[in-house]
Amino acid sequence: MLLLIACSGDGDSSETKQPAVINVYVFAPDKPIITRGDIGEVNPIDNSINESKITSLQIWVFEHNTDNLIAYYSPESVSNLNSGTGATYQLSASNAFTDAETKPQVDVYVVANVTSANSGISLGERTTRTALEAALISGDYFGLNTLTNQVPDAGLPMSGVLRGVSVTGSAPVYKISNVTLTRTVSKIRFVFSREKVEPETDANKVKINSIQLGAGMIPTQEYLFLETGENATAFHVVGSYGTDDATEFLPIVENQVQPLPDIAQNEDPMAYSYQAGQDAQEYENLIEAGLNKKVTVDGVEKPAPELTQVGPFYLRESGMKLTGAITFQKNDGTSEPKPVPFTMHQAGDFSRNHTWIVYAYYSASGLVAVTVVVKDWNDVQQSYEVVNW
């Protein structure tokens, strides 16, 4: 009898609860959405190395009702995310989560490409939930003092958050609900063309003297993470919008704006205007084709763009209704500089992960600015656990 008791005791002591893990599914960036009223998806300008690239990834899971960290993970390699195949990450959960009979609701924070170099933000395993909630993009990072006209080496910062969600699955493998990663910044670019006139003379050329965004359009600070819940907005900014002068998008050398001496020409500039009901990818392809058009002369292919682009520029999101003006004149000096205003359709169209095309063309009636609200630059809703737009 003593022997049997001893065997039973040994069996009980050898039974240990297997550590819990939480599966997080991360998929590579897919197509963005460029819209005038949500008309569909489009590819980023450079999906391979620029706007969609991911260089780093960090994931935190906290207990919803406390600041207790359940799991943190930052993979050494994110190559799968950039190859388009995606990757599955398994986060080792804390002992408290493993031992809990009833698993608590959780808050999940995911960031990509967030570094001190491209956002001024440094994060790690010891970063608390309070610090994540308070993290801000400010200063010269995607602001107006120093314009960002190319994707940083670390990539564009992205984030996604879930608050108060339940974990699913069963011991020892659990999973969380979908998390959608989006770029925390937005993009604006200006595209120009003029009507082709024969014979070509200086009198036909159109000089762009200035491209300005109105004062007080971009906030001084933007939260890294959006709010959630019924009253959450598509943007999350703090602080003032500033009272600085209008921002110039043309290059400035020794305090002098460097104008565009001329813009590309084509037979029908209106053909590059957005048409009601036009598919988003179709319109994006049209603009890209105009910017990159080539002709073959004597068997040699040469660039022959029908459009001129200034930008793109990557800026902090804004809840304002963005406005600005393009100033132009005939290049032969026979006309005075004339400003042409442009404006967004409504406030909030430049919230994070949006892009905005301002297309201006010159014809016999003068310069006409046509703004295309490019919404949800890449915010594809897919049935993935973590979607990197």
Image (cartoon, grey):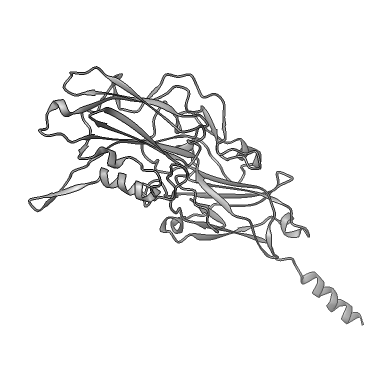
In-image side of 76 versus 189 (left or right): right
The residue positioned 43% from the left and 44% from the top of the image is: 35
Front-most of residues 293 and 7: 293
Q: Residue at x 77, y 58 (%)?
A: 102
In the depicted structure, whether residue 272 falls above or below residue 281: above
User: Whole-percent x and y of residue 303?
Assistant: 18, 45
- Residue 321 is situated, as x and y percent measured from the top left of the image, at 48, 29
Going by the picture, which residue comes out furthest to the left? 298
Dividing the picture into quadrants, the one containing residue 287 is: top left
Give above or below for 223 relative to 323. Answer: below
Q: Residue at x 11, y 29 (%)?
A: 201
Camera-side residue: 290 or 301?
290
Residue 362: quarter of image: top left
The quarter in which the N terminus is drawn is bottom right
Residue 54 at x, y percent in the picture? 45, 50
Image: 256 above or below 357: above
Residue found farthest to the right: 1
- Left or right relative to 369: residue 243: right
Residue 21 in the image: state x and y as whole percent.
65, 61
